[in-house]
Image: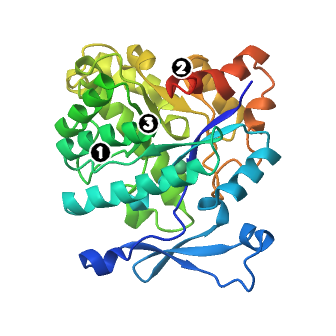
Amino acid sequence: MKIVDIHSHFFPKTWPDLAEKFGGDDWPWLRHEQVEENTLIQNKYAKAMLMKGQQAFRPIYAACWDAQVRVEELDQHGIDQQIISATPILFAYERPVAQAEYCAQLFNDAAIEICQQAPGRLFSMAQVPLQDADAACREASRAKSCGHVGIQIGNHIGLRNMDDEGVITFLQHCADEDIAVFVHPWDMMAAERTKDYMMGWTVGMPAETQLSIVSLILGGGFDRISDKLKICFAHGGGAFAFLLGRLDNAWLHRDIARGKSQHLPSSYLNRFYLDTAVFDHDALQLLINKMSEERLMFGTDYPFPLGEQQMGQLIKTAPTLSDSTKKKLLADNARHFFSLDQ
Ligand code: CO
């Protein structure tokens, strides 16, 4: 069994000064800590501060940009293959399309370079300028031809949810071209009220993901988009599975809660996948009960502090899962979803 982690993030070690190129004072960049000698040991612990303009955003370390460090850590945890994707701060959905398209190509090509340093171990998902469906489709097709195994998108573009026409057009394109899509929450709601205690991550993100799945279902997305679409949502779908009963109940008893969906929300569960980054055996069991063992894929959110620190242990130590279920979650479902055997 080759264990595949489908949810991890990277940053290139450096990239062009986007503020200088495009103007503006809130572009992402890395402020690297100085190291005296460039040995591997020091590189392994090399740290950088992810900056947004002059604001410190998040401390990160060499695993983000150094394939060798990453693979060493994967080896320590028995992970055979990992799919890396950008961190949402790099999406640039709020910028002019041309700038977002430039960023997508820049970071997508950088991801391929990292993966080329660990052939057969590291794979990548690309980002696209999702604010413009034509540009997003163009970059998705280019990325596939460059070797990316899928596309990661943010779960909304400003006020536009997953039921947005442009997003649906993009998803249909991905269905037509057999491009797998991974939806990651970002730009979390209620920012003013969740700014303390990392509540944007612990409360806002799961709410964002629930909102995405609900809006795609009720907006009629799954009724309109080909069932060939392979789409997966991060963090176990956030709050979705736990609150599915509430959603079905609303659909049954209020016609305005049905939107454009033709069927009960719970009848669309065979149309999407979730990752397993839920950090709790009961939550994992709930996902299996609702989604089935065919629709879940192992994801860690490596190499960040809110990811699974002992990668793979949640599934490996799950008391109620059979070996064959664990194998599907850890390996088989992802190999199929991302066509890794081709
Ligand atoms: Co993530």
Mark 2: few/some/many CA within 10 Å (<14, 14-19, 20+): many
Within the image, what quadrant is residue 97 found in?
bottom left
Q: Residues within 10 Å of mark 3 (few under 14, many from 20)?
A: many
Q: Which mark lies nearer to you, 1 or 2?
A: 1
Q: Nearer the viewer, residue 194 or 90?
A: 90
Question: Is 260 situated left or right of 242 in this image?
Answer: left
Callout in the foreground (3, 2): 3
Instruction: Provide the residue designation for mark 2.
Output: 291
| Residue under the image location 56 percent in, 75 percent down | 49
Above or below: residue 219 compared with residue 110: above
- Cα separation, mark 1 vs mark 2, equals 31 Å
Give 256 or 268, whichever is nearer the viewer. Answer: 268
| Three-letter code for the amino acid on which mark 1 is drawn | Glu
The dot on residue 139 is 1
Question: Going 19% across and 62% down the picture, which residue do you hit?
Answer: 96
Q: How far apart are the alpha carbons under marks 3 and 2? A: 22 Å
Q: Secondary structure at mark 3?
A: strand
